[in-house]
Every structure is written in structure tokens, then in C-alpha cells.
Image: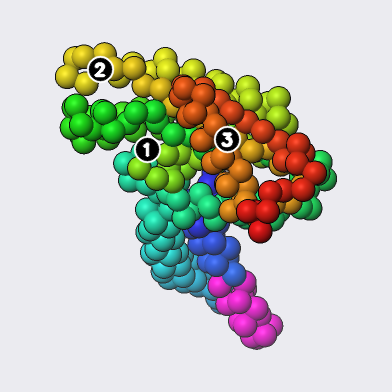
Amino acid sequence: MDFSPTGWGRVFLWTALGAFGCVAVALFVDSFNFHNLGPDDLRWSITVDILVPLGLAGPILFFLLSKLRELAIAHELLRRHAATDTLTDLLNRGAFTREVEEALADARFAEDGMRGTLLVVDADNFKAINDTYGHEQGDAALRLIASSIRAVLRSADLVGRIGGEEFAVYLPGTTLLIAEAVAERLRQAVYAAAFAPEGKPHQLTVSVGGAVYDRHLPFAELFRLADQQLYAAKQNGRNCIAVTSIAHYETLPAAAA
């Protein structure tokens, strides 16, 4: 049963605990007068002390807790809406940046040390889709690319749309070898996606740049390094990957400051 603020489990649990708590209070208060009552009056008093709180407190608590659950659901929907790119249902740029920054901060205290990867993914020649088939088909292509990316990732990975046709993926706890393998699977997944606007097959491809870290870096610097690799992948003819490790740098480039 779901005991989260949006689940019914919490409503039922606290309704039961609250109602029984009211019964306990009623019995405790009346207990000081029990010694003055005969057997029949005592049974009647105990019955009233049980049934009245259950009959009144139970429905009232259930109603109030149900309203709190509805508020929690509304708050969660608003939070998700504020964090989600409405076209692709991925994290938007602000939410992705915030969650990766939090993950980077938490990783400094992880037992297995700090390591991970940031990938930046850009749809190749995307303007041609909009110009040839219109923005509606362009939107369809973005949704297809987003679902293709998400299909190859783990549940712990983060993916967001950070620009028009640009996406970013955060892979916690990954080495350079794993990052390259994921980037290549991602590229192949998009390449294999069937996209046929107006019944005309159109090949989708992406270029992927990545930066693998093994020590703490600010998100902005990690993104800059990954974006540099994306540029290298574009220069190499598109539809390819370029992933590097910051371990290759004895000191990071001066532009990082």
C-alpha cells in the first residue's frame, strides 16, 4: 500500500490511528469515574466511549486527510509540470541542471567515490525537418528522439531536453568505457527509429558529446567539456560520438575558470 503523501495508505493509517487515539482519550478521561458505576452503567459508558469517537472522529479524520491527499497530488502535479518539458515529457533545462547539481554534490560523499558522465545529444540537420515537413513533424521527431534516448537508459540516469533539438543525459557511477558504450547505444537507437513524415522515410541521426569525471566539477564546467566533445562529433561528420575523460587533463583548460 502507498504510504506517500499522495497515497491512500497514509489516509487509512492516520484515520485509524486518530480514531483509536480519540477512543483512548475518551476511555482515559472516563476511567476516573468508572469506580462509581455499576456493571451495566460501566458497560454502557465504555460502549459510548468507543462508539462515539469512532463514529465522529473516524469520518471527520478521513475527510480531512483525503483533502490533504488531494492537496499533495495537486502539489506534485504542479511540481512535475514545472520540471517537465511538455513536448517530450523529459526534464526541462532548469530541472535537469538542478537535479544533476544535487547529484554531483551528493556524490562527493558516496562510498564508491565520485565518478559519472554527462552526455550532450544534438539532433543532426534538424532544421531541414522543420523546413521540409513543418514544425508539427519536427515536434514528432523530437518526441521520437526523446523516447529512443530514454529507452536505453537505466532508471537511475537522468535525461532532459535542454534546448530546441538538444538533450542531455547524466550517467552516475560510470567509467569512460561504459559512457562510450551508452553513447553509442543511444546513437544507434535514434538511427534505428522509424520516422516517416507524410509517408516519406526520413533518417534521424544524432551527434553525442560526453565528459566523464572522476573528481568534483561544477555542472557548468562539466557541461562545457561535454559540449566541446559534441562540437568535435559534429566536426567529424555527425551521427557519431566523442567522449573524453577529465582524467586526460592534468589541469583543466583556463576557460574553465
Part of the protein shown in magenta: 22-40
Q: Nearer the viewer, mark 3 or mark 2?
A: 3
Q: Is residue 37 magenta?
A: yes
Q: Nearer the viewer, mark 1 or mark 2?
A: 1
Residue drawn at 64 percent across, 38 percent down: 211
How far apart are the two marked residues, 1 and 3, measured between alpha carbons?
17 Å
Mark 1 residue element: loop
Name the residue nearer the viewer: 218 or 96.
218
Q: Nearer the viewer, mark 1 or mark 3?
A: 3
Residue 257 picture location, percent across and down: 66, 58
Residue 131 picture location, percent across and down: 20, 31
Residue tagged 1: 165
Label 2 packing within 10 angstroms: few (<14), some (14-19), many (20+): few
**Residue type at mark 2?**
Ala
Assess whether mark 3 and mark 1 are in contact (beta carbons under 8 angstroms).
Answer: no
- Residue 252 in the figure: left or right of residue 121: right
Residue tagged 3: 229
**Where 56 sits versus 136, above or below?**
below
Label 1 packing within 10 angstroms: few (<14), some (14-19), many (20+): many
Label 3 vs 2, first from the N-terminus: 2
Instruction: Examine the image and state in which quarter residue 43 appears.
Output: bottom right
Residue 107 picture location, percent across and down: 73, 49
Residue drawn at 41 percent across, 67 percent down: 64
Residue 118 picture location, percent across and down: 60, 40
Assess whether mark 2 and mark 1 are in contact (beta carbons under 8 angstroms).
Answer: no
Mostly what secondary structure, the magenta segment?
Answer: helix
